[in-house]
Amino acid sequence: MPNPKETKMEQMADFLAYRETYEQDHGPLSLEVKVKPKAVKRKNVTKMNTLRLGSDFEVKVLKSTAQLEKGVEKGKKYYKLYY
């Protein structure tokens, strides 16, 4: 298995070589990032709100501040719901 530090160093060396070649062909890289307004307005990712406990049983949680705790005791699975 390769040493992770060597791999990172090789990757860094490869990137710097690529960057130098790119800058020779296209000019210097800009450190400025332009953000599109559409990307900023995207909906935030929310946590799962449907808990499926089998093919015939679902629990839908509508409160976004609710917390679920999953566990196993005596070979049986359980969920605790805090709301």
Image (cartoon, rainbow, N blue to C red):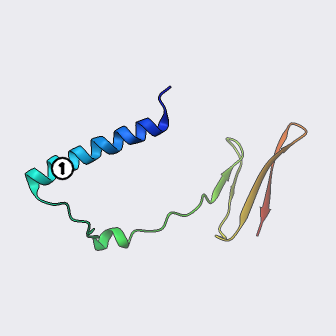
Residue in the image at 14% along x and 54% along y? 23
Quarter where residue 39 is shown: bottom left
Percent position of residue 46, x then y: 55, 64
Residue situated in front as seen by the camera: 53 or 76: 76
58 relative to 72 in the view: left or right: left
Residue 47 versus residue 15 in the image, above or below: below
Residue situated in front as seen by the camera: 49 or 15: 15
Percent position of residue 50, x then y: 63, 56
What is the count of numbered marks?
1
Percent position of residue 51, x then y: 67, 53
Amino acid of disc 1:
Glu
Residue 75 versus residue 39 in the image, above or below: above
Label 1 Cα crowd, 10 Å radius (few <14 / some 14-19 / many 20+) = some
26 relative to 58 in the view: left or right: left
Residue in the image at 85% along x and 40% along y? 76
Residue placed under numbered mark 1 in the picture:
20
Residue in the image at 21% along x and 50% along y? 19
37 relative to 28 in the view: left or right: right
1 relative to 41 in the view: left or right: right
Percent position of residue 58, x then y: 69, 52
Judged from the image, the secondary structure of the residue bearing numbered disc 1 is helix
Quarter where residue 80 is shown: bottom right
**Residue lying farthest left?**
25
Residue 41 versus residue 7 in the image, above or below: below
Quarter of the image with the C terminus is bottom right
Residue in the image at 39% along x and 41% along y? 9
Residue 77 versus residue 47 in the image, above or below: above
**Residue lying farthest right?**
74
Residue situated in front as seen by the camera: 53 or 35: 35
